[in-house]
Image (cartoon, rainbow, N blue to C red):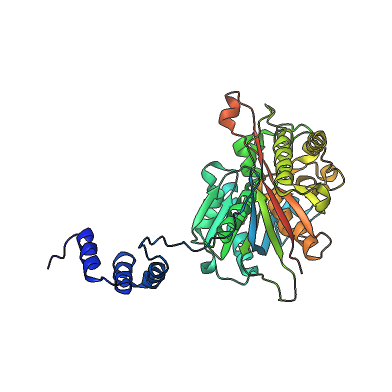
Amino acid sequence: MYLGSRKEQLNNYERICSNLIGRAICLGSCILGIENSLLHIFCFFTNPMGKHNVRKKERKRNMQQGKQSISFETKIYIKSAASIVGKKEGEGPLKSEFDQIVENPFFAKDTWEEGESRFVTETCLLAIEKAGLEKEQIRYAFAGDLLGQLIASSFGIKELELPFVGLYGACSNIGLALSLGSIIIEGNHGENVLCAASSHFGSAEKQFRFPLEYGNQRPQSSTWTVTGCGAFVLSKNNNEKKSSQGIVIRGCTIGKIVDYDIKDAQNMGAAMAPAAACVITQFLDDFKLSVSDFDQIITGDLGSIGKQILEKLLLNNQIDVKNKHMDCGMKIFDSEKQDTHSGGSGCACSAVVLASYILRKLKTKEWKRILFVPTGAMFSPTSFNEGHPVPGIAHALWIEVEEE
């Protein structure tokens, strides 16, 4: 039997339900369904003129902070972290910090690219295991690397059968992954999120510079791409005992691409330093904080030359970080003994140092609050060979020990 259009049905209900209660029940049921009827009944009782403007559920406070930043109201815990590195990294100053050191750069695969993918798979599985979770409990995976079409991440995450978001921010990838993972959790779109970043000396040199067989000479401004992967599980729940304080991400600043017209492919530190200075300055302004509020300001892979440039640029803005600045690229290798020149680089550089050395410092409360600033050079062989410069980017994350 045809009951008429929705408008006709509503008109019929209006005529039949002449009293206020009947009108509320009928309109509420017809328009929004039984589950929302009681809310509309209340609206009709409190609004006798019949204008039912239902208030939406009160939202959380605005998370936007300043011009480029986000402040997290939810506690975003770094529930677990894992780091697996190659032989050279395992011979450096942080050798005792890493979860696993792999002697064979191919990681028992046929190519460097396949080897890097295995670094991703194994490190992610280890992070999930350390979090006390099954992979099915991971809502999303955010990961990135330096290779074309993100093949290291995509083939590595493929083995985990997880919803995957591939990221490219060059060597700042882990900052981008942790920022987006935190936003997902803050928005209540997932309880556990996996974040990872990888790089490989062999695959990076092959794609961006020269084949290793060529044996080209490297200038002192060049850096050594870190072989390895760092992975993290972010969660609403702490992995530590109730009596222990967790490590949380309090906020982030998404960086801008900054171009200082650097055209030296062997000096990525100079390309990235302006972007790092820009995002650090913006972070401090957005959150109304100062360098003194942090135990360490930690950049990703500027190396010795980029570190000097960053400190000078910030000092021009009356920001002095010299006594609190640490660069992951200078920490992971002994440049003199290991012949890495300006230091380490690559997506894995900041990722593995954060997953090992930095988090240990926070867990032991030697540091209680850090500003973590992974840096990236948006270097493309195509654009570079066409005469374009190498712009830089950096993202900043406010990480601290949970307040008692």
Residue 375: in sight, yes or no? yes
| Outermost residue toward the top in this view | 387
Describe residue 358's horizontal placement relative to residue 2 as left or right: right
Between 271 and 153, the one nearer to me in the picture:
271
Q: Residue at x 51, y 68 (%)?
A: 136
For residue 231, above or below residue 134: above
Describe residue 138's horizontal placement relative to residue 265 as left or right: left
For residue 229, above or below residue 363: above
Residue 95: in sight, yes or no? no
| Outermost residue toward the right in this view | 323
Count of marks overlaid on the render: 0
Q: Position of residue 391 (x, y in %)?
A: 64, 33
**Which image quadrant for residue 340?**
top right
Q: Position of residue 86 (x, y in %)?
A: 70, 53
**Which image quadrant for residue 257?**
top right
For residue 223, above or below residue 141: above
| Outermost residue toward the bottom in this view | 242
The image quadrant where one finds the N terminus is bottom left
Q: Residue at x 55, y 70 (%)?
A: 134
The image quadrant where one finds the C terminus is bottom right
**Which image quadrant for residue 305?**
top right
| Outermost residue toward the front in this view | 49
Between 328 and 333, the one nearer to me in the picture:
328
Q: Position of residue 399 (x, y in %)?
A: 72, 57
